[in-house]
Amino acid sequence: VSDELRKRKLLRYINETRQRLIRLLVLVSWHKAEAKKVPVVEQCMLLLQNCENYTLGLRTASDNLAFLHDELRNLLQPKYDTETALDILCSSKLPLMPSSIQDVAPDAQGGVAETTTGADGGDGNAALKRLSTATYMKLLDMRDALADSFTGIDLRVSNGRAHITCPDMFEVIVALDPMALHLKERANKSDDASAAVQWSLQEVKLLMSLCGGKEILSANQMAKMKFQLQQVLAERREKDPIPSVVQYMKELTSKLVLYTCSSQLNDLVAENYKGKLRKLIKKEDPLQPGQLRCLYWVEPQKDIRTYVELSLDDKDFKCNCRNKYQSTSSNFEMEMKIDTQSISVERVIWEGASRMSEMIIRCLREKFSEKEIFQRINHLGMSLCTPSCSPRMNKLEIHTADSCVLGMTVDIYTGRLLLSSMSNQWSNSRMVAHVRRFNAKFAHMLACVSESLVNGVYLAQLVSHLIQLLEKMHSAIILEEVGCLVWSERKTRFREMKPSTETATRILDLARSNLDHCRELILL
């Protein structure tokens, strides 16, 4: 590069740099002068943002107008007041009409019944019959689907309305929209699957109640439940909504039973509770959601757990109730049923304890029947007494011909085996001493008598000890009877100066028919 060309480039660079510095000086001077005013750039940005928002609003309005244009076609179809028409046909009353209609209504003698059953009565009955037939056909289509998904659902049609009932739980009354049948025929001709048969909700009834006949839900809660059911019907337009309604009601009622029992159980275990179950039951934290567990026969020294468990069945949508037993050796469970007509968790606990005690008594009875003592001692029998009142405390009695030797029952409050006697011989000091010593020596075994349900060795040991106690108590009764006979013989001799043949015969019979270790004393 020549020297002249290099000087030209340097001069051009100096001129460009000078012009940039002048522009920068002007910009700095202008910024100082306009510092206290709103910048023009910010105003431009704000204007552009407002333009974008306005464009977006116009686009949204255009889309809404297009949707509204499509929905306006439905206004061409007539909207019938099906609910009022069905109410007039079924009840022959006008509860949904304005009160001013009573001014032009027929007199009380004729009433609405004459108007509805007059010249047009045949047409009304025919229309109601067609509606009932259509409802029958629709229910027949879904009967198999309901039977496969749910158990215990009853379907019937009355006065054009479909009654969907789950016994002791709920009843839903729905009606078929007559206009929907016409739309369905048109849809079948045009192969349009969007127009489905519509149902309208008429009434919802809860067939459950609390203990004492109290309602389980208030009027406001019932209104909310009906509103939610109407939403379920509205959301299932493309397919039949009845299975969804049944599933919703079964889930709701089962959760309602569980929530009610949980609330009642919280009251039973509260500190200020002063009922029969005070400090005898315990609420256990659930292992999984949708589960309630209440332990009964609670004692610190027990390694056995007996409890009632309520849980939700996600498959069949119901609240299951089980009476369970757990120990270190084994466990088992039995199904129970909750009386939804009078929901009471206290009654459920009593029922579980009564069933468990009944099983224990029956196990003892079967084991006692295998022993030879009933063949060895004459007139010694065994019977099972089951009271009809609740709570039930089954009692196993071992008795002679005229007196009870030993009675055994399981206390449903604590689960302990209680020993008793119903005869007048209980005042015998020997019998009282035998029972006291037995209770003191085998206190732990009597407290854990529920172990006999699953442990055969424990059951055999308990019955063996009870047989020994039974022999001792029977001997005490015999000796008491002999003492009474001897005392009566002495008084007879003192009055009549002659022996009593009947008393001597009775003593000899007792000696021949009873145990060896008291025979010599009886003969003496």
Image (cartoon, grey):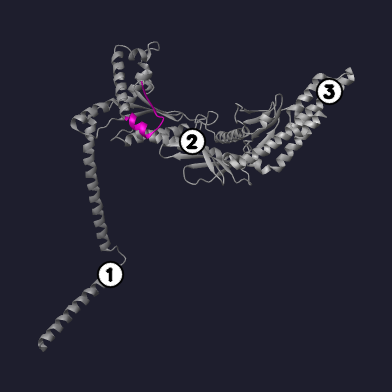
Between the C-alphas of marks 1 and 2, the distance is: 76 Å
> Contact, CB < 8 Å: mark 2 with mark 3?
no
Quarter of image, res 406: top right
Residue designated by label 3: 488
Residue stretch rendered in magenta on the structure:
142-158
Q: Nearer the viewer, mark 2 or mark 3?
A: 3
Q: Nearer the viewer, residue 190 or 475?
A: 475
Q: Image point 23% across, 32% down: which residue?
A: 74
Between the C-alphas of marks 2 and 3, the distance is: 66 Å
Amino acid type indicated by mark 3 = Ser
Quarter of image, res 61: top left
Q: Is residue 414 above or below residue 493?
A: below
Residue designated by label 1: 31
Other residues around mark 1 within 10 Å, as few (<14) / some (14–19) / many (≥20): few
Q: Image point 49% across, 42% down: which residue?
A: 291
Amino acid type indicated by mark 2 = Val
